[in-house]
Amino acid sequence: MVTTSPLTAPDASRSPVPHHLPGLDPSWSRTVTVEDTDGVPRTWHYLDNGVEPVHGTVLCVHGNPTWSYLWRGMLAAAPPGWRVVAPDHLGMGWSARTEQPRTVEQRVADLGTLTDALGIDGPVVTLGHDWGGAISLGWAQAHRDQLRGVVTGNTAVAQPPGDFGPPLIRLAHLPGFRPFGCVATPIFVRATSNLSRPALPREVRDALALPYSGAARRTAVGDFVADIPFAEGHPSFPFVDALAEGVRTLDVPALLFWGPRDPVFGERYLADLQDRLPQAEVHRYEGASHLVTEDAPEYAGLVAAWLTDLDASPVDPGPDPAAAVASADGLSDRLWSVLERRREDRSPVIAVDGGLVSWAALSHRVSELAAGMAATGVRPGDRIGVLVEPSADLTSVVYAAWRAGAVVVVADKGLGFTGMRRALRGASLDHVVGGRAGLAAAAAMGLPGSRIAVDAGPPAVRRLLGAEHDLDELARIGRGTAMPPEPDLDADCAVLFTSGATGPAKGVAYRHRQAAAQVGLVRATYDLGPDDSFVAAFAPFSLLGPALGLASSLPAIDVTAPDTLTAPLLADAAAAVGATVVFASPAALRRVVATRDEVSPAQQEALGRVRLLMSAGAPVPSALLRSVGEVLPSASLHTPYGMTEALPVTDVSLEEITAAGAGEGVCVGHPLAGVSVGIVPLTGPSVDQPVTDPGVTGEICVRAAHVKDRYDALWMTQRASARHPGWHRTGDVGHLDDEGRLWVEGRTAHLISTAGGLVTPVGPEQRVEALATVHAAGLVGVGPEGAQVLAAVVVPATDGPPAPAPRRRGGSLGLRLAEHHLAESVRGAAGVPLAAVLRADRLPLDIRHASKVDRTELARQASDVLAGRG
Amino acid sequence: MRVLVTGASGLLGRTTATALAARGDDVTVLQRRPSGTGCREVLGDVADAVVVERAVRGQDAVLHLAAKVDVVGPLVEYERANVAGTRTVLAAARRTGVGRFVHVSSPSVAHAGRPLVGAPADPADPAHARGHYAATKAVAEQLVLAADSPDLAVLAVRPHLVWGPGDTQLVARLVDRARTGRLPLLGPATALIDTTYVTDAADALVAAVDACGPDAHGEALVVSGGEPRPVGEVLERVCLAAGVPPPRRRLPVPLGLAAGAAVDAVWAATSRRDQPPLTRFLVEQLSTAHWFDQRRTRERLRWTPVVGLEEGFARLGRWYAAGCPPV
């Protein structure tokens, strides 16, 4: 017997759920009475958006100790044509309490009786959280004929080998604790919603706990915990074990979203699910905890987008006309091809720390390490976290890993310990290679994976670091072993985490094809020939030498602290390989210019041989480039535009910058051969394709063979960045001019949305910085979107040296009112109406490059100051 | 159009009545003393139902400015002028079939002391508004908006910090204090505040009289110049225009708040009627941002300020230079 409140006119008065719970539409709340598998009628409470399921139904399954309220965001965000149904398990939420505990097997069957009763017979996507995820996957296996896809958030189906279960669940599992913690008191019910940081609103926490007030209503919460099998003897073990294995047979589209700050289910549970569902798309919400649906309510938009894409046919971007130019440029080379060709070459390939490594030595070392890695368990596709300073060892390890088919994972030191830990823990590492400091850091970060030491040293140290091998051992093992097969051009080769100006670093994944294209593009852009060699004072290029077929020299500095490079150190590095090219960052160049008088005549000569300087990483003021010209008298001075996701995109020389003159933004030159640049306008109707019309300001998009493959484990972010098929949205704002040159005007995140329209910051900043009284300027908006007003923050020019830039982010800038005359001249120069002119002793800088203005931090502090007493 | 303007002896009322008359409206003004506008005068108290009914009868629109604006004095006086007065004018408007009622309110009716950063016109909140003036104006606004009906379109307009030549409230008091060195800057004086030049505010009220109807009624709109500036900069510009030394002394905000609270207590306890040197309300006003999102106001009223800050300061400077002639 089935009785259900009618779908069309739900009787809200019969709903047991109080009205006015935040985010919950009372009309979603329904009840239905269904006979369970034993023939006992049970009244279920469930939420239903009541939509005619044109595309299908999303079946949302909550875990313990929550209820369907958890899914309110999904009901609200369902794409058109998707019915969303979210029941409360029997004994839980507002569904009927049962006399006996229900096992997971019964719950899977119960769910089937419910979906039958609700007439859910079309395509279904299951969506589960916590142990509700396991139940939803059980339902999925029992309904293969109608299963369209599976989605889970912070779910586990099995304990990974060697794991004893989530510590918190184990605590709740203790016979002595469970009756007390889960049933007699609301400790467990309340603890779950108290994991979030920042804390969830009190009304939401209360709403989650509402159906569990009173021990009698909490019985099933305790039973649910007791039913989780930790060992083979448990009655539910065989069922859950079979369920977990069965997940491997679910060859339907899958989506896993994850809150990594989960003390219940750690990273290894995500890895376990990925292993069972290798086709799954993954999106991680950094900072979100176990209640990922509450901490990252945007999950609903993620699932909605994924559902929409399920029924959309993939769009073929078609051939990229610009790419034809690039592919003609010898892309047949693999990253290690030159190394293999020059196995007998005794000439130097790397100069570092006063020593030289020959092509022959590096070539042999790479082969041996690659074979050694393969022989010791590094499989194609394995991810290797690399915690090694730029050095010959780093170069050997990276090329060996590539040759062995492994994926190199690198996190920029500029992220700091916390940022690196967050990045690397989320990168699904299989192995970690590091020096002693690196491996110690890996242990402190709690990184998974086997350990390879650069040099393990004494056994005690080796044990401490957990190192299974060191490089010499790997090389020895590899010496007698066959080389592993070459990885496919479409295999992943690297995941890079660099410090962005805002938010947690994103992992940028590259395939071999894209990395090879980048090498080809750099070679072609700077016309690098066999007679060239270079100084790598720009960290990302320090590995490129062997692939480019060029000798490279690492200056005797910490490459991650570029402002320690001096003119003499640059000269020594250049002399070591007779360098003709210098790759550097603006921060490094500032110091080089400041120390130019310290070079000896011999050093002068080495610098005089440099024919080309490329300064990358941030916009370079032309005044700085001009000064660099005095240090490198023969060099043509270039600065490319690009980002971690695509480098380089354009290039411009000092002469071209001068010829372009002043304009709105920074002129970064023409797109390189093989690179398409387009603009998605900021206002007006949306466009199918980025446009190239001159004078249109918008988000800069790039299409080229060397653009990143994707963002790692950030499905939604990747989807947004590739909204125009084939193109990468850079997050930068700019325009193309009449001559096809690109001008960068700032970041989309730094756009200022005033009542009078959008304002980009770089143009006004440049006009203000042109004042003799101003050393540096930043333009930010304060106030609500659409009604922001502009504030300029200026560092007045002084005779003395500018205040040193602290490396720590977030220190007070001491913002205060600029005096009348300074304010008046800044207002006059800016060309946009300014609500306030503030002065500061320094501007907050982007940590990595120590040269880009961190406008997000600047806006935060300016907003505080301009709001007055808080 | 036949328009009654109440409270036309104040700067904004006088300017608005003059502007309405100048464009050809048939303007009657109601206040206790002669307004000097040249319009038809009805003299009397807005809380006097007989006088009010006489002034309101036959009008097409009422623009209600009359209010007690001050920081001292007992609550009962504010209630009589601001609440009872508004109730009387509103009742007369309903009784006599006036079609439009534009009530001039104040942003302070919704301000509980927190910074207002590009804020919307939040609902009036008598329980949290600061001081007798704001609290009674909040009650009045609620009365007016509750009276919105198909027969009587009402709009509440909240001009923010109206200033200009002839202003005895804001500008004259600031300049007076600065001249005698009694105008400190509170803290860093960086809080953004928006202001409204008097003729821009008057234009907005004229626009409100025109707009009040089926397309714009039953809501409150903040009117301001839309050019927020740091409070220190505003004070400096006013002083420069008036030819007095800009404030240099700084008073830490917590100290100012404490002093303001103490002054409030003394003035309340002793029923003093003279201007206090400082009030908690004033300290809050001078140390927290208050500026407003003007998009809805401008769309509803189809009005934009034409004078603005720069031209306003120039006019203020010329007026002081001319020896402050009557406006």
Image (cartoon, coloured by chain):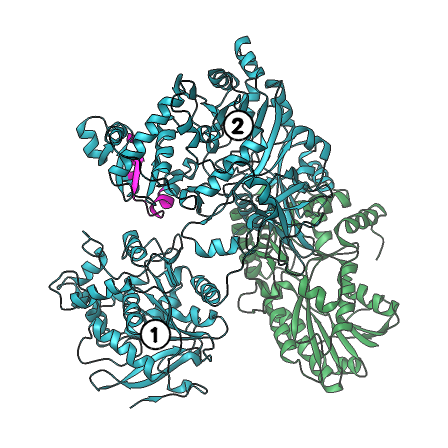
Q: Is residue A437 magenta?
A: yes
Q: Colour of chain B?
A: green
Going by the image, does A828 lie left or right of A754?
A: right
Q: Nearer the viewer, residue A124 or A135?
A: A124
Instruction: Indicate the chain on which mark 1 is placed.
Output: A
Highlighted range, magenta: A421-442
Q: Earlier in the sequence, mark 1 or mark 2?
A: 1
Left or right? Give the position of B80 relative to A379.
Answer: right
Q: Quadrant of residue A615?
A: top right
Mark 2 = which residue?
A583
Q: In the image, what residue type sits under mark 2? A: Phe
Q: Chain of mark 2?
A: A
Q: Is residue A548 left or right of residue A71?
A: right
Note whether residue A640 is visible. Answer: yes
Q: Nearer the viewer, residue A562 or A239?
A: A239
Residue A590 horizontal side relative to residue B173, left or right: left
